[in-house]
Image (spheres, rainbow, N blue to C red):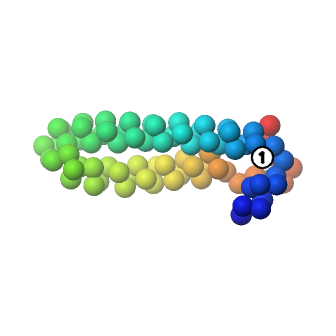
Amino acid sequence: GNRHFVFRANARRTLVREGAAYLTLAVLIATASGGLVKLLSEWLQTAPPLTKLVVDPCLFFVSFAVQRHLIFQPRRPGSERV
């Protein structure tokens, strides 16, 4: 939990790196959301708010997977990244 986060080696560098990666992901997800809603609502002839109800939950799972496997991946003992 938080205790591990605060006291692990290179915590500040890790925090900056993870923060930058998370911010980049947030911008990409927001851009993808807008683009996909526009594209799909025009292509399927549906109202954008209805299309957004489908697109955003899908992007939530994409975001979750990226965060879990790439941004905040668990560290194995002895494998600290610098």
Q: Which residue is mark 1?
A: 11
65 horizontally vs 29: left or right: right
Q: Position of residue 34 (x, y in %)?
A: 31, 39
Q: Quadrant of residue 2?
A: bottom right
Q: Residue type at mark 1?
A: Ala
Q: Quadrant of residue 42?
A: top left
| Mark 1, other Cα within 10 Å: few <14 / some 14–19 / many ≥20 | few
42 horizontally vs 20: left or right: left
67 horizontally vs 63: left or right: right
Q: Position of residue 35 (x, y in %)?
A: 31, 36
Q: Position of residue 79 (x, y in %)?
A: 82, 47
Q: Looking at the figure, which quarter contains the C terminus?
A: top right
Q: Position of residue 61 (x, y in %)?
A: 45, 54
55 horizontally vs 63: left or right: left
**Residue with the most extreme right position:** 78
For the residue labelled by badge 1, is the local secondary structure a helix, a strand or a loop? helix
* Residue name at image x 43 percent, y 53 percent: 60
* Residue name at image x 82 percent, y 52 percent: 8
Q: Looking at the figure, which quarter contains the N terminus?
A: bottom right
